[in-house]
């Protein structure tokens, strides 16, 4: 739905209601023979959260700010690691159990940078990007609570050396 | 005027996604929060949450961040995407 333009054609940020194809996104970033590593992450709607059954969820975001934060995170990843492609896709709206929510894909010459950047991006996305999950279950609707463990995961990157 | 936006649980509890507030007498995010909280008990309760976050012109901000006429200020709970 929303594509954010920036100067680097290999840096893609999309916030959209439509589903995405991991195969297509992989193909789009795995075409450069100077890259030895492609790391991707896909996040899905899980069946249980904090002990309650989940049937579907609705993702809300802050149009404009969300895209801007994701672009900033991608730029931080480029500053920190020698990356070639960076793709961040996050869906919004209603999603059913098992559906894909988020995709992160990064490429680099070597695996260490690609693994680290991918984990950095999802850790920071979860704590910095303005998205909110409203879960629906048998016991009604429930706004998901932010987790301390997610904050801790993101804060680890502040202390880490490259 | 200051354009004020609310998201997620904050929007739902207040029953509105957007209000306009006159900029007179408001110089920072905390003063804007207090002006909105003075509306009634419900607004006071929702906007007194320790976990409440604030963004000024779509950038995460502190509670002493400067707010001026024409700014867009958003209040929302901790983020839960990914």
Image: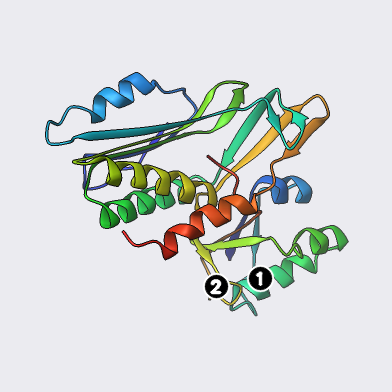
The relative height of residue A113 versus residue A35 in the rendered view (above or below) is below
Q: Nearer the viewer, residue A32 or A37?
A: A37
Both marks 1 and 2 on one chain: yes
Q: Residue furthest left?
A: A34
Q: Residue A13: image x %, image y %? A: 36, 40
Front in this rendered view, residue A162 or B32? A162
Question: Rounded to the nearest whole Å, what is the CA distance between mark 1 and mark 2?
Answer: 8 Å
Please indicate, yes or no, whether residue B58 appears anywhere in the rendered image: no
Name the residue rendered at 43%, 65% in the picture: A159
Question: Residue A80 appears in which quarter of the rendering?
Answer: bottom left
Q: Residues within 10 Å of mark 2 (few under 14, many from 20)?
A: many
Q: How is the image coloured?
A: rainbow
Image quarter in which the N terminus of chain B is found = bottom right
Image coordinates for residue A117, horizontal then vertical, percent:
34, 47
Badge count:
2
Residue at mark 2: chain: B
Whichever of labels 1 and 2 marks the residue nearer the N terminus, that label is 1
Residue where numbered disc 1 is placed: B32
Which residue is pictured at 19% across the width and 34% down the height? A36
Query: Quick one: SS at disc 2?
Result: loop
Mark 1 chain: B
What residue sits 38% from the left and 23% below the top?
A: A22
> Which element type, helix, strand or loop, lies under badge 1?
helix
Q: Is residue A68 visible?
A: yes
Residue B67: image tag: 2
Q: Residue A34 lies in what quarter of the image? A: top left
**Which disc number belongs to residue A149?**
none
**In the figure, is residue A110 to the left or right of B2?**
left
The reply to whether the C-beta atoms of the residues labelled 1 and 2 are less than 8 Å apart is yes
Front residue (pair A154, B31): A154
Q: Is residue A2 left or right of residue A100?
A: left
């Amino acid at each position: 739905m929303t594509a954010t333009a920036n100067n680097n054609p290999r840096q893609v940020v999309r916030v959209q209601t439509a589903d995405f194809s991991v195969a297509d996104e992989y193909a789009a970033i795995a075409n450069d023979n100077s890259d030895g590593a492609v790391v991707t992450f896909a996040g899905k709607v899980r069946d249980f959260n904090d002990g309650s059954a989940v049937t579907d969820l609705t993702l809300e975001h802050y149009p404009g700010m969300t895209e801007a934060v994701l672009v900033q995170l991608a730029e931080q990843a480029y500053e920190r690691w020698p990356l070639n492609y960076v793709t961040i896709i996050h869906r919004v709206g209603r999603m059913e159990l098992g559906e894909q929510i988020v995709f992160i894909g990064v490429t680099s010459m070597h695996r260490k940078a690609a693994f680290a950047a991918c984990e950095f991006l999802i850790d920071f996305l979860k704590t910095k990007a303005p998205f909110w999950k409203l879960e629906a279950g048998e016991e009604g609707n429930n706004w998901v609570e932010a987790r301390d463990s997610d904050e801790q995961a993101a804060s680890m990157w502040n202390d880490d050396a490259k | 005027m200051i354009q004020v936006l609310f998201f997620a649980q904050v929007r739902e509890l207040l029953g509105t996604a957007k209000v306009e507030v006159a900029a007179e007498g408001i110089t920072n995010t905390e003063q804007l929060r207090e002006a909105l909280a003075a509306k009634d008990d419900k607004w006071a309760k929702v906007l007194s949450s320790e976990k409440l976050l604030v963004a000024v012109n779509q950038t995460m901000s502190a509670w002493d961040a400067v707010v001026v006429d024409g700014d867009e200020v958003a209040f929302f709970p901790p983020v839960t995407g990914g």
